[in-house]
Amino acid sequence: MDNSSTVQYAGLMHNLIMKARGTVRDIDPQNDLTFLRIRSKKNEIMVAPDKDYFLIVIQNPTE
């Protein structure tokens, strides 16, 4: 993956993770988002958020 795509994915995933984390905390303030998986026909995106960083994996779901 080229650098511009990496930066784009990181920015978009950051926004999505923050919204998902907020939603989880709205449901239960003592809970936190620990893992997010999104699967489409083109990609499967898995995100493991931590306090200081996000681990993002993008893979082809057919492999």
Image (spheres, grey):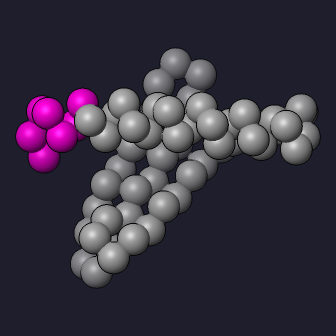
Query: Whole-percent x and y of residue 39?
Result: 44, 68
The single residue placed furthest to the left in the displayed view is 2
Residue 41 higher or lower than 58, as above or below: below
Which image quarter: residue 30? top right
Residue 40 x, y percent position in the rendering:
39, 71
The correct choice, above or below, for 45 with respect to 13 in the image is below
Residue 14 shows up from this direction = yes
Foreground of the two, 35 or 22: 22
Magenta stretch encompasses residue 55: no
Q: Magenta span: helix, strand or loop, mainly?
A: helix
Q: Residue at x 33, y 76 (%)?
A: 41
Answer whether residue 55 is visible to the viewer in this image: no
Q: Identify the residue at image location x=75%, y=41%.
A: 23
Q: If the image is split into quadrants, where does the C terminus sit?
A: bottom left
Say left or right for 62 vs 49: left
Q: Which of the 4 image quadrants contains residue 24?
A: top right
User: What range of the chain is rendered magenta?
Assistant: 1-7
Query: Residue 47 at what x, y percent from top left?
Result: 48, 46
Magenta region includes residue 2:
yes
Numbered disc total: 0
**Outermost residue, bottom direction?**
62
The part of the image, by quadrant, that contains residue 7 is top left
| Residue 2 drawn at (x, y percent) | 9, 40
Could you tell me which residue is drawn at 39 percent across and 37 percent down?
12
In this rendering, position of residue 2 left or right of residue 31:
left
